[in-house]
Amino acid sequence: MGDLTLTTFDWVPEPPRGYVRDLRVRWALEESGLPYRVESVPFRDRKPEHFAHQPFGQVPWLTDGDISIFESGAILLHLGNRSDALMPADPRRRAEVLEWLFAALNSVEAASLPWSILIFSGITGDAPAYGLMDSFLKDHRLKHMEPVLAGREWLAGTFSVADILMADVLRLINRFDGLTEYSACRDYVARATARPSFAKAHSDQIAHFAAAD
């Protein structure tokens, strides 16, 4: 393994600041204690080299020596394999981390992302699309996450990459008051975001984008 470099945009508009997905990687890196540096690519003028690392022109990606990895979930798995602070050694616990990491991405975020896009677009209230997605998110995802999180501090015994992903997904829902009726989900987000590693990752991201204003 080599030096770790996280690449994100040089600037983004104010609304997504604090929620761009390089925050998940920053958070994991801070939890792990692994040394890393941050580099930038243009937000407005995305070059071929950017697409060579991230074929959809998004961020983040991580380089680890001669390895380049995109997608936040894949990056967190890679870092989990490098740090016991992010992934337990016990095989049963590791399996729990993996299932909840994929649940955060494929079950909860798959429901929350279209819901949040509708809200960003001003499509709420009586709009049929919003009603459908709001019901799907709350009745088929949050309703089932609530008893899980009411019964445990972290998803797989100790804090892990699964919690970074799940808390970040739920954090965006909470931004739009989607967790109002789900106190265990809110408390879980509060526990996760009270960690010093989150506070540093969040402030570093805000400062990074603000520096380009």
Image (spheres, rainbow, N blue to C red):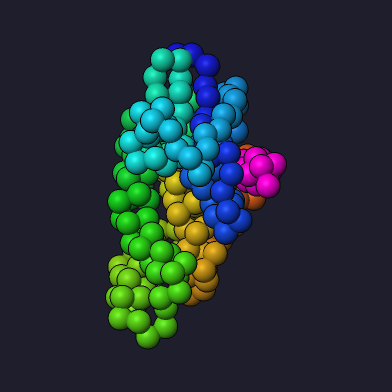
Q: How many marks?
A: 0
Q: Is residue 65 visible?
A: yes
Estimate the x, y position of residue 101 in percent, counting from the top left.
37, 44
Could you tell whether 84 is left or right of 137 in the image? Answer: right
Looking at the picture, tell me which residue is in the foreground, 19 or 190: 19
Picture quadrant where residue 112 is located: bottom left
Q: Residue at x 52, y 71 (%)?
A: 177
Left or right: 15 as drawn, with respect to 21: right
- The residue depicted at 61 percent of the width and 56 percent of the height is 14
Q: Which residues are magenta?
A: 200-213
Q: Residue at x 46, y 28 (%)?
A: 62
Which of the 4 image quarters holds residue 207? top right
Q: Position of residue 47 (x, y in %)?
A: 43, 33
Q: Looking at the picture, how far across and down is residue 21, in whole percent?
A: 48, 45
Q: Residue at x 49, y 25 (%)?
A: 83
Q: Is residue 211 magenta?
A: yes
- Magenta highlight on residue 18: no
Main secondary structure found in the magenta portion: helix
The N terminus sits in image quarter: top left
| Residue 181 higher or lower than 69, as above or below | below
Q: x and y percent of residue 75 in the render?
A: 42, 33
Question: Is residue 188 placed above or below 142 in the rendered structure?
Answer: above
| Image position of 17 with respect to 211: above or below | below
For this rendering, which residue is in front, 132 or 57? Answer: 57
